[in-house]
Amino acid sequence: MPDSDPRTIYLADYTPFTHVVEQVELTFRLAPATTRVLSKITFAPNPESDGGTFFLHGEALKLISARIDGAAVEVRPVEGGLTCDVPSGRFVWEAEVEISPESNTALEGLYMSNGMYCTQCEAEGFRKITYYPDRPDVMAPFKVRIEGDLPVLLSNGNPVAQGEGWAEWVDPWPKPAYLFALVAGELVNHLDSFTTASGKQVELNIWVRPGDKDKCAFGMDALKRSMAWDEQVYGREYDLDIFNIVAVDDFNMGAMENKGLNIFNSSAVLASPETATDANFERIEGIIAHEYFHNWTGNRITCRDWFQLCLKEGLTVFRDQQFTGDMRSHPVKRISDVLELRARQFREDNGPLAHPVRPESFVEINNFYTATVYEKGAEVIGMLKTLVGDTGYKAALDLYFERHDGDAATIEDWLKVFEDATGRDLSQFKRWYSQAGTPRVGVEEALSDGTYTLTLTQATPATPGQEVAEPLVIPVAVGLLSPNGDEVVPTQVLELTETRQEFTFEGLGAKPVLSILRNFSAPVILERDSPNAERAFLLAHDTDPFNRWEAGRALAKDVLVRMITEDAAPAPDYLSALNTVARDETLDPAFRALALGLPSQDDLAQTLFEARRTPDPLAIRRSVRALSRAIAEHSGETLSDLYDDMIVPGPYSPDAEAAGQRALRGAALGYLTLVDDGTRARAQFETADNMTEQLGALAALLNIDAAESELARFRAQWQGDRLVMDKWFGLQASMAPPDQAAERAQCLTEDSDFDWKNPNRFRAVIGGLAMNAAGFHAPTGANYRLVGDWLIRLDPVNPQTTARMTTAFQTWRRYDADRQGMIREVLEKIAATEGLSRDTTEMVGRILA
Ligand code: PHE
Ligand code: ZN
């Protein structure tokens, strides 16, 4: 599709802008329907440009006046902006435009949320604020004056002057327009400060609506820990006098790294023990760190163009993952990240939406804020680090900051820094950036005369627009264990660079047990049928915690696939191995909680599909439930002991240790509820003093379809809290039994609190339903149509969120002809909708192609 759409933009077509911007001055006269934006921009010819027509982006702007060097100028409107004749040297452009924040429901540009003004400019939203070269390689210092009858008026940089109804801000650091931000409203602040390594005082604020002030403390603490961590680990200090975070209820994404003024979806910053779960706290800590880390990887060094998005996102995700590992537990973080990678990125990479980490064309850039760019982008950096080692990585990063500070850089710049710092040739490694698809790695073992030979193969399946794939550089971390459990060869990294390659290990008496792809050293799918006895051995003995977990996972998958396809009974070996892990007190509770989790129904559907079997979502669900019940029955005593022992004493604290104990206790409760009629869950719901336990109990009861009274009480208790009510909506949509899902979803969308224009609420219900594997795929197709009709309704209001949620259908070709037919009909109906946004058009086109 991207190739046939005339609006397609290509990486190969990059040319620099005709001019450089030396200075930007903006004045905002705020009014809900008639905000005036006055701009004064100094342009000078760009020595790096071959010339061309002067062009400014602009969308949905009412032009009041335009002048060049003080004289009125005739502008010519063109698609997406305007052109005009300009002097040959330096000149000053002045314009006045009018915009209407209150009617901006797309939440891009300047808009209103609950009476406050806020902005979202990444990727191309600044053009909805004023005429400007809205591209990331145009960087300039900004001066902003805000006029408005509101107590809090914020923008980027440092505050320089203010009075009744106005404020002025100066951002000395040249930045692209996508990092511009403005906030105005009746807000209160949670205030703190941070002293940088070089002794500079920085004022820190989290700005929220008055009722939310008690939900900022954790976010503030996470911010201070992020600032200290970036100094210690990357040597990066903060560079302004003030750092502001604002919580906004209506926001398309998690959060945004605007220079000195991060804007957050309130779900990504507000937390109190009563309203947020342990998972929420951990996510908030990670997102605060992520946005803060962007100050160096994204803002000080930005992207030359949007094809380079992974330059800032892959690296910043990698950094926030390191941070969370340091704050909490590296193995637990790695396992959670791989779960997420497989659930979202592998799903994308093995379907119609597959694209390289650095795409080469797009119609709408907002459609490329994907798991591939973010999560696979981070994996690629992790592999680089594995290949060059910690010292090489540090030298490369130091050089990156030194060489490119103030630049709009490319992936070529990034890799060159590694080559120069380490002397390594990365030309083959670079394919990770241009080749889509998840590589399959095959494994063969042989032992003769004490020499153990490991033969590894690689192949990457075809993806849209890419028929043949070249071999990649794949770091494969392996260790060898002796049959008694001792490690005979500690972890070493094999570099698989060819389609087929042999690695030998000398001096081995007996055949060792192979522990391969330790710590998940590359984002690949291992194709290896190892015997279950070997998996059970690794689950019990591997020294690599990731692979220990992975062995249990592989066992569970094998058991489930046999249950689904052969009607097998749950394997007793698996049940007892799992019981042993659950009881093992030498293991971290958080790790044990993860080990107790079963593969998701979506994961199983993909596994069956790859084995050329048509997945039946209802059969998958039945087997997962049967296995859960078997675990509950087999390990009843263990689970009940865990439930009684893992009570965390004292008042609630969101720290990793306490959260891990609650996670293990919660996992136990989930199983026990299947066999105790909900007795424990009901009691826990009664007495819970924190959201983790309250919601855990509610979910456990929903899972046995016995939560009616708790749902009503939960609602009565939390009616006034939007974030908690999102959970109430989301849980019901994602957990409804298959035969009730359509009715439940319909009912939720008719609820008076279903504020569908709020992205969080829309995602809770419509996204929740799409995640309800068996429910979404109920054989009538009712839920396909329900989701489709809601996407058609949301599209004119909020194209970005609509386009994102079309991914509910990306796996459609896995299923049987009936289901495929019904989904095709829905997708074609969406595609045929008159006036469908560019965003949704592109996504549906790619999914159908
Ligand atoms: N750049 C943001 C981040 O990853 C994500 C984002 C993209 C937010 C586009 C809003 C719009 O941190
Ligand atoms: Zn980011």
Image: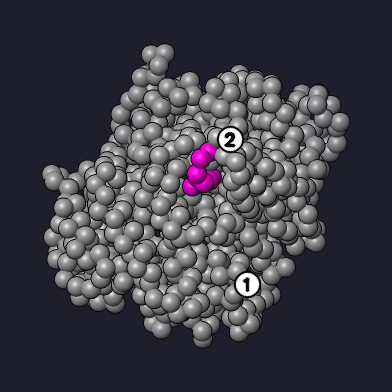
Query: Is 51 or 237 nearer to us in this picture?
Result: 237
The residue lying at 51 percent from left, 86 percent from top is 780
The CA span between labels 1 and 2 is: 39 Å
Relative placement, left or right, of 730 versus 682 is right
Q: Quadrant of the C terminus?
A: bottom right
Residue type (three-letter) at the residue carrying disc 1: Arg
The residue lying at 36 percent from left, 75 percent from top is 626
The residue lying at 62 percent from left, 78 percent from top is 820
Decide if residue 671 is in sight here.
yes
* Residue at the extreme front of the image, as rendered: 449
Residue type (three-letter) at the residue carrying disc 2: Glu
Residue underneath mark 2: 506
Vertical order, 235 against 251 (above or below): above
Task: Answer whether residue 169 is magenta in the image.
Answer: no
Residue underneath mark 1: 612
Vertical order, 828 against 259 (above or below): below
